[in-house]
């Protein structure tokens, strides 16, 4: 089931920055990008997160966009991931996968329950304007493309 052109499921999760973060609170300030990640061990997730880390301040400062990465692991593992990759974004822990399940789904892997990697752009009205669910663990949307997508009024910046 696609979430595009709908209001996304609400959530509140523990953050590596301390306390909890809720989607409704973040959407009060403007658009948001929700990233569903498979786990702290996923190199493709780390690569994608680094691209969003690089553009997160620019998106926040210029468009009031919050980047909200969700990782299907306990907070300790998620914090280790943030620190290992020197990310400038705080990660949210979703160890039981309930939020990931509401967005892109979950699957059992050799690492246990993981989220299916996905990227969602939610506009200032709280509507999902972009959804990309991975067909393969390496299938990702990267930060710079999303920055152009948002700045192009939620249209593909490279479409003819």
Image (spheres, rainbow, N blue to C red):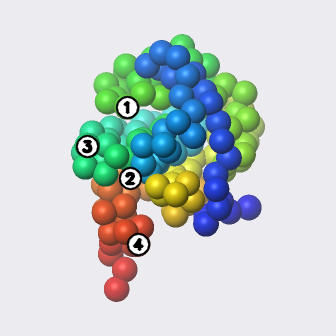
Q: Point out the tag, 1 or 4, that comes first from the N-terminus.
A: 1
Q: Residues within 10 Å of mark 3 (few under 14, many from 20)?
A: few
Q: In terms of depth relative to the viewer, which is nearer, 58 or 85?
A: 58
Vertical order, 143 against 94 (above or below): below
Dot in front, 1 or 2: 1
Instruction: Say whether residue 55 is left or right of residue 35.
Output: left
Q: Quadrant of the N terminus?
A: bottom right
Determine the residue positioned at 31% across, 43% down. 60
Q: Point out the tag, 1 or 3, that comes first from the N-terminus.
A: 3
Q: Position of residue 44 (x, y in %)?
A: 46, 42
Which residue position holds label 4?
155
Dot in front, 3 or 2: 3
Name the secondary structure under disc 1.
loop
Residue 89, disc: 1
Name the secondary structure under disc 4.
loop
Vertical order, 95 against 143 (above or below): above
Which residue position holds label 2?
142
Tell me, yes or no, whether the two marked residues, 4 and 3, touch with CB atoms within 8 Å: no
Dot in front, 2 or 4: 4
Determine the residue positioned at 37% across, 31% down. 89
Which residue position holds label 3?
61
Tell me, yes or no, whether the two marked residues, 3 and 2, touch with CB atoms within 8 Å: no
Within the image, what quadrant is residue 17 found in? top left
Tell me, yes or no, whether the two marked residues, 1 and 4, touch with CB atoms within 8 Å: no
Q: Residues within 10 Å of mark 2 (few under 14, many from 20)?
A: some
Name the secondary structure under disc 2.
loop
Alpha carbons under labels 2 and 4: distance apart: 15 Å
Q: In terms of depth relative to the viewer, which is nearer, 68 or 140?
A: 68
The residue sitting at the front extreme is 28
Q: In terms of depth relative to the viewer, which is nearer, 99 or 31?
A: 31
Q: Point out the tag, 2 or 4, that comes first from the N-terminus.
A: 2
């Amino acid at each position: 089931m696609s979430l595009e052109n709908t209001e996304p499921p609400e959530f509140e999760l523990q953050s590596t920055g301390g306390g909890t973060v809720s989607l409704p609170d973040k959407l009060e300030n403007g658009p948001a990008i929700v990233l569903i990640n498979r786990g702290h061990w996923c190199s493709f997730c780390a690569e994608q997160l680094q691209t969003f880390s690089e553009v997160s301040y620019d998106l926040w400062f210029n468009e009031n966009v919050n980047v909200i990465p969700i990782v299907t692991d306990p907070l300790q593992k998620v914090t280790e991931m943030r620190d290992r990759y020197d990310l400038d974004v705080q990660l949210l822990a979703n160890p039981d996968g309930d939020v990931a399940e509401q967005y892109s789904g979950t699957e059992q892997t050799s690492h246990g329950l993981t989220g299916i990697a996905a990227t969602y752009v939610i506009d200032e009205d709280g509507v999902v304007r972009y959804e990309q669910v991975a067909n393969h663990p390496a299938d990702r949307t990267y930060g710079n493309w999303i920055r152009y997508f948002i700045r192009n009024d939620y249209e593909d910046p490279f479409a003819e």
